[in-house]
Image (cartoon, grey):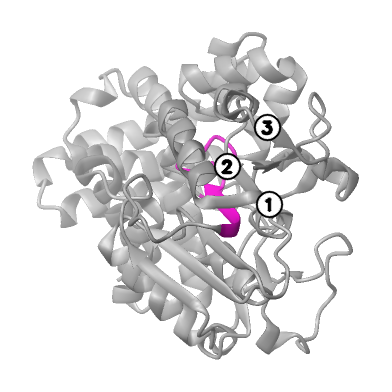
Amino acid sequence: MSARRVAFDVLRRVFEDGAYADRAFRAAADSAGLDHRDRAFAMQLAYGSVQRKRTLDHAISTLGKRPARKLDPPVLAALRLGAYQIGFLHGVPPHAAANESVELVRAAGLERAVPFTNAVMRRLAEGFPALLESLGDATPAEAALKHSYPDWIADLFWREHGRETALALMEAMNEPPPTVVRVTARGRDLPGERDPELPAALTVDQVPQEWLAEGLVWPQSRGSQLAGLAVSAQPGERILDLCAAPGGKATLLAEVAAEVVAVEKHEGRARELSEHAARLGLTNITVVHADALELPAHLTGFDRVLVDAPCSGTGVLASRPDLRWRGDPLPDLQRSLLAAAAERVRPGGSVTYAVCALNAAENEDVVDAAGLAPDDLGADWPAFRHPRRPEFLLTLPHVHRTSGFFIARMRA
């Protein structure tokens, strides 16, 4: 199976079946047996086409003279891939993009749609670059179309960060994020230049499979690593991780603490977390398959609790390309999780709240509602100090070259 066919299958799974792009891609690429180069190209095509869906559909509708929403799903997926290559991958000849899109439609059994697909691809090759140039970004609505975001995210970024930062965020999260791993205790002697602020963070071109198999590294962004470090785990402590899968932060904490209880609501993800801990040789992690809001009574008295809460994901839209089309703010759930954490920590212990979101409603508003006294995290990591609330941390994709995370630590 070719790289374009893998990307085509991913687009169909995401937009027809509601699949997550990262999981759909992993399954399709593994099944196709792509080598590293083709796998990278397939990911670029799939993720880029998912991210740029709004702009691509605007071009398809405008130049194709038929609303994108009325097209057969396989035809629309093929046109999105072709349009993405013409508009955003300047090394791909337009005729190659057009031919491949036509072949994808033919392979899907839609011979009747081949002439239409061919005609639209010709119009895209002739008109898409000029159409892109004509799109403005003076207002949130214009920027949402140009940079391919839903209106609510553009409005949110504009309102909370201002136009200049909003545009920088939108542009940064349309680019592939750097590949970063956390070097585990097993892999501390691995070669490579480490991050001076996050000493276990290592940026690589690709992650060697043997490093993963041997538990030498864990794929984890700098922002996510910072969230785990901000818990400030100490030897001998018991720590509760309330929303633990896939386990990046739980395994980071377990390298220091005496015991980590990792709670995960989804059964399959809880099972995977156990497998990850075993691969890293961490025997001090206990995985609990349960709802964090309905834990057994004996799980209490922890020295520290981490709440890495579900959120809208507005800080991780580069690595989660489909999330911009499905994510929603979740402040009610976040407040409930933070209240549950406060009930499970011992007096004088700490609660750390982290979300990969960039809006006050899911960040400082949730923390303020908890009524707990904040620690000054900004004193320990001044490079990540929140610009409005310096006691908190905030990583910004366009500034820190990592996923966007809000992090606060409080005392019970």
Residue occupied by mark 1: 223
Nearer the N terminus, badge 1 or badge 3?
3
Nearer the N terminus, badge 1 or badge 2?
1
Q: Position of residue 199 (x, y in %)?
A: 82, 69
Q: Secondary structure at mark 2?
A: loop
Mark 2: which amino acid?
Cys
Q: Position of residue 175 (x, y in %)?
A: 63, 45
Residue extending farthest top: 139
- The residue nearer to you, when weighing 308 against 16, is 308
Numbered tag placed on residue 356 in the rendering: 2
- The residue nearer to you, when weighing 240 against 349, is 349
Q: Is residue 210 visible?
A: yes
Numbered tag placed on residue 94 in the rendering: none
Structural distance between the alpha carbons of marks 1 and 2: 8 Å
Residue at 68% of width from left, 32% of height from top?
169
Q: Position of residue 113 (x, y in %)?
A: 15, 38
- The residue nearer to you, when weighing 343 against 338, is 343
Residue at 88% of width from left, 45% of height from top?
383
Residue occupied by mark 3: 169
- Residue 260 located within the stretch drawn in magenta: no
- Range of residues picked out in magenta: 302-319
State the quadrant of the N terminus: bottom left
Mark 1: which amino acid?
Gly
Quadrant housing residue 234: bottom right
Nearer the N terminus, badge 3 or badge 2?
3
CB-based contact (under 8 Å), mark 1 and mark 2: yes
**Relative vertical location of residue 349 with respect to residue 323 in this rendering, above or below:** below
- Residue 307 located within the stretch drawn in magenta: yes
Q: Residues within 10 Å of mark 1 (few under 14, many from 20)?
A: many
